Structure formats: structure tokens, C-alpha cells
Image (cartoon, helix red, strand yellow):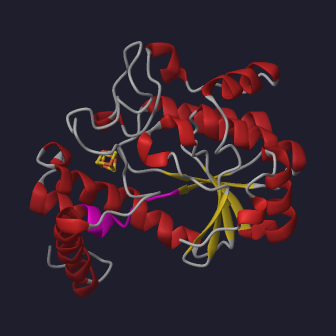
Amino acid sequence: MPYYEELDDLPAEELLAWGLRTFGDRFAISTSFQKSGMVIIDMAARISSKVRIVTLDTGRLPGETYEMMDIVRRRYGIQIEAVMPDPLEVQLMVKNHGANLFHTEQTYRMLCCQVRKVRPLDRKLRQFRAYAVGLRRLTSDSRNEVHKVDDKNGIAKISPIADWTRQDIEDYTRRHNVPIHPLYALGYSSIGCDPCTRPTENGEDERAGRWWWEEAAAKECGLHFSTDGKIGRKLDILIEEVTQTTNGYGFDGSGI
Ligand code: SF4
């Protein structure tokens, strides 16, 4: 994937300022309101009160994440653009594979992530030329080569705090009194959908609580890294089943 090597040394604030200045209202922060995302929101809001914030409402989020949406709206005076999955894709997926298909096997979990996260975000990102995310290299092996600015299908994907440590996040959060997602107080260290996230123990990897039943797998949903090989091919077939039928039926859901 091509990337903008010359931007890789810019500090987080400068990179966000560059994004806001260069792309204006076609720049957004994509966040699930975890600590890293909240740091980016806080920094960007200090630069511009007009920054756009996008979040994925998968339909399976914990109640505390909706609380965070309200907290952010009140604190920063910025409306949250919640992105929902295509209802027909969800309907067909659940009809074919059940509501909790993620427990069946990894490919079905990834199908759920594609339908509820990846595809909705891809559709939303067509409005933008750049977006910022809270990825950090130190959170897992699968993320240790994250660049500060990548090109994702013609859209600049900016990771302003890619080189930050967990302590950097804690320090910034304390210094600026940034709101903290309530689930951290209950032992969570990474927060996603309710049925797919659990608290972590001391000494566990930060993302160990995500899809914990998939012990050997990389803890990724497809938003940041694509899946290839045998699993990728099976996933493509499953996605096609859901989306082809959806396209054929139209958006009123008739015939299902
Ligand atoms: Fe589905 Fe779980 Fe992925 Fe959420 S995290 S989209 S519930 S598999």
C-alpha cells in the first residue's frame, strides 16, 4: 500500500492540523470512542470546532458507547455522524447464519464485521478525501507497521498517534481531562461490540479481550487490514451471498 513517507515524522497535532487544513469538511475522524480515539477528537477539536466525527453504530454496541456519543456531543459541541449497516444485508445475514454467527467460526465472524462495520464505513468514506483513526503500532503484532498516512483506495488514512505508547495516551487524557469510556473502569482495555469484547487481565495483550475465543487469530475486524488466503476467499463468497441477494431484492425487503 503506498504511503506518504514524508509525513511519517510529524507530531500528532501537526498531522491533524495538516489534515484539517488540506481536506476541510472532507476530512473526518473515525472513532469508537476508545481512549486513543478520544485523544484525537480532543486534539482536533482544539484546532477546529468544525471537525467531523464518524462512528459505526453496528447495532451490537454496548450501552456505554452510546453514552460516550452524548458525552462527546456535549463536551465538544460536535454532532456525531453514526453510520449504520444496510438493514437488508443484516437481515439476510441473520436469516442465513443466525444473529450470533460470530461464534460459529472465524469466517462467519468476519462476515458479521464486514456487514456491520467494513462495508458501511466504506460507503460513508466516499464522502471524504481523508480520515483519521486511533491506530497505534504497539497495541498488537498486526499493527506494528502502521504508517502515519496511508493511501486507502484514494483516501488518505491518517494515524496521528501511530507512534504513541499507552502511557502517552494516559498522560494526554489526564492533562486535558479527556472523557473516558466507562468500560475501562470495568477492566476493558479495548472496546468494540458488546458480544465480542470482554475485560482483560493484567499482563494480557491490549486486544486480548476482542473475539477471545479466536485464540490463534489476529484480532482484527477488516477495517484496517484485509483478509486473504483461504479465509479471504471463503469470506468473499459469503459476502457475495448477502449482497447479491440484497441487490436483487431491492431496498423494501420484499420477498424475504
Ligand atoms: Fe459482529 Fe462482533 Fe464484528 Fe461486531 S465485533 S460486527 S458483533 S462480529
Please provide percent x and percent y for residue 142. Answer: 42, 47
| Magenta segment | 83-90
* Residue located 41% across and 57% down the image: 117
**13 or 139, which is in the foreground?**
139
Please provide percent x and percent y for residue 35. Answer: 61, 31
Please provide percent x and percent y for residue 82. Answer: 55, 54
Please provide percent x and percent y for residue 242. Answer: 21, 72
* Residue located 70% across and 50% down the image: 79
Q: Is residue 12 left or right of residue 242?
A: right
Q: Does residue 235 appear in this view? A: no
**237 or 203, which is in the foreground?**
203
Q: Quadrant of residue 76?
A: top right
How many numbered circles are shown? 0
Q: Quadrant of residue 150?
A: bottom right
Q: Quadrant of residue 75?
A: top right
Residue 87 falls inside the magenta stretch: yes
In this rendering, the answer to whether 251 lies above or below 40 is: below
**121 or 215, which is in the foreground?**
215
Outermost residue, bottom side: 248
Q: Is residue 46 left or right of residue 140?
A: right
* Residue located 65% across and 52% down the image: 159
**In the rendered image, which quarter contains the C terminus?**
bottom left
Residue 235 falls inside the magenta stretch: no
Q: Is residue 221 left or right of residue 6?
A: left
Q: Does residue 68 appear in this view? A: yes
